[in-house]
Image: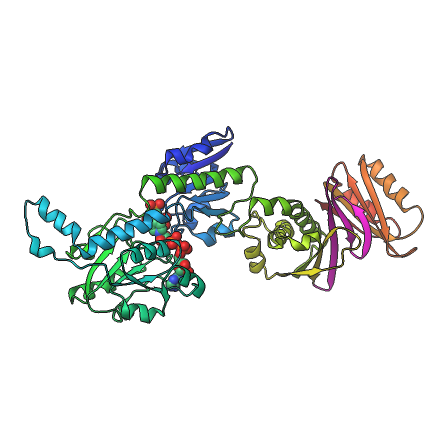
Amino acid sequence: MFRVLVSDAISEEGLAPLRTSAHIDIVQKKVGEVEDELHTFDALLVRSATKVTEDLLEKMTNLKIVGRAGVGVDNIDIDAATKRGIVVINAPNGNTISAAEHTFAMMAALVRHIPQAHISVKSREWNRSAFVGKELFGKKLGVIGFGRIGSEVAKRARAFGMTVHVYDPFLTKERAEKLGVSIHSLDEVLASADIITVHTPLTKETRGLLGTENLAKTKKGVYLINCARGGIIDEQALIPFLESGHVAGVALDVFEQEPPGDHPLLAFSNVIATPHLGASTVEAQLNVATQVAEELLHFVEGQPVTSSINLPALSKDVYEKIQSFYHLGRKLGLIASQFMNIPVQELSVTYAGTVADLETTYITRSLLAGFLQPRVASTVNEVNAAMVAKERGITYGEKFSDETHGYANCISLTVHGENKTFTIKGTHVPNYGDRIVHFDGVAIDFAPEGHLLYIQHQDRPGMIGKVGNILGAHDVNIATMQVGRQEAGGKAMMILSLDKPVDDAVLKTLAQIDDIETVKRLEA
Ligand SMILES: NC(=O)C1=CN([C@@H]2O[C@H](COP(=O)(O)OP(=O)(O)OC[C@H]3O[C@@H](n4cnc5c(N)ncnc54)[C@H](O)[C@@H]3O)[C@@H](O)[C@H]2O)C=CC1
Ligand SMILES: O=C(O)C(=O)COP(=O)(O)O
């Protein structure tokens, strides 16, 4: 049973696809309510309220995937998840429109004092002169962060007759032109905008982006909106700018701490606020829940996930094409690691033939994970392989070649260790399987499966019989045997596939045969 903990309020209708699977068990409880069971869950689904910290991940020892029913993943310790090989997925566009509409609603409310006027009327007052506002028409809107939400806000602003100035260091001129906005430096946007709205993720770079220094560069009388993440506008820094009247008004949907409690900003009559409602619409909640539920189902079924934060994006089509090579890659890495059971510095992977035209990043990650797995106690997979390699000082690189050795495709792995270099090559034959076609300088042909025994010896008559006798005497059945040699009478090798693994005593007996130089167990 695949156990899913849903720890925030996620649309029931959106989760429905998960309920159709007999293999999935859904538990809807807060993390604090299932402390004793945390180690039993395979998946965790959250919104922004649950903090997926390293400490929580430490307790969720069986966790394989975290799904964020929304965009921002700043409540998830991505590095800690990646380190543990836990896939993190989100729903990147399900709530874009809702967040953009909320931003626009906040903008209109801010410049027309709607919340304040509403409270006044509800208090049985009729004070029209106290709430004279400003038009949006003809104003300059500064958009900081021009991704999905920023660009939807800009479209609506243009429809209102506003000019849009954008700051986004990753935005291309073509995209800006297409959407009818102009690109500026941050300083230019700060100096020119009548209203500034932020739509970046919260990162090390964007935390405090609008702090004392940058707020001082804004126009006197500027309005500010944060419907992205608390902390992008520095809340403490804002206070003197409100006190002096430099900032005319602020609309906040998000706070550094949520809920903000008795926050000093809330005491200002020209600060309006909502309790993180950007994505709180029926439509957005259905969209994001459906997106993560569908992705989770793919994950459970062994299909690729397309919106992962810590895995390269893969479409179903591409995944189907690389799947066989992905398995071959893992086997090549696994066998090479056991054969080279010494410290290694570098792995070099060469792709040739049909595989060279595919998305090889994923295959390389799989190969790397196979290589690292025998060397580390925790799980290594394509999520954390690069990180684990880095931690261990192992570098890796990809190359592409035309040399297929007569096969339709060929993956070659060369491992550089201390005083030794080892090369293994494999191919995938459709409807037949994976074959290792080159092993440590010798052309050979065997399936990388099960309990393998590698024997390196001098090419002499009678070697096969001697090995067979010893294995037979120890009740070890040989399923297949492949032999190869560099030249007659020279270095030769046998790769045997056995029905059960041999123990150390048998290895030792085999190693004592004259002309046998190396005997190694290899598990594939
Ligand atoms: N209030 C709410 O309920 C909601 C809030 N959000 C938040 O809105 C924000 C934006 O979401 P999306 O538009 O979907 O994300 P996105 O990833 O499509 O866009 C973010 C943009 O920010 C830009 N950016 C990154 N660093 C930057 C920097 N240092 N300076 C300027 N621009 C920078 C990126 O290039 C990108 O274009 C996120 O923080 C997300 O968490 C999203 C949905 C609902
Ligand atoms: O998607 C996002 O980034 C949001 O901020 C929405 O947060 P929520 O899912 O409503 O807690």
Where does the image place residue 87, in percent across and percent down from the top left?
Answer: 50, 47
> Which of 90/438 is in front?
90
Count the marks.
0
Magenta-span inclusion, residue 440 = yes
Where does the image place residue 335, in percent across and percent down from the top left?
Answer: 71, 49
Relative vertical location of residue 221 with respect to residue 129 in this rendering, above or below: below
Relative vertical location of residue 518 with respect to residue 418 in this rendering, above or below: above
Q: Quadrant of the C terminus?
A: top right
Magenta-span inclusion, residue 319 = no
Q: Is residue 374 left or right of residue 205?
A: right
Q: Is residue 82 left or right of residue 125?
A: right
For the view shown, which residue lies furthest in the right direction?
Answer: 461
Residue displayed at 50% across by 40% down = 62
Relative vertical location of residue 134 with respect to residue 469 in this rendering, above or below: below
Give the color scheme: rainbow, by chain, secondary structure or one colour.
rainbow
Residue displayed at 17% across by 59% down = 134
Residue 148 can be seen in this image: yes
Which residues are the magenta region? 418-447
Quadrant housing residue 391: bottom right
Where does the image place residue 147, in percent across and percent down from the top left?
Answer: 40, 57
Quadrant housing residue 388: bottom right
Where does the image place residue 496, in percent across and percent down from the top left?
Answer: 80, 43
> Which of 141/289 is in front?
141
Q: Is residue 416 left or right of residue 227?
A: right
Residue displayed at 57% across by 53% down = 385
For the view shown, which residue lies furthest in the top direction?
Answer: 22
Residue 44 can be seen in this image: no
Q: Main secondary structure of the magenta part?
A: strand
Quadrant housing residue 26: top left
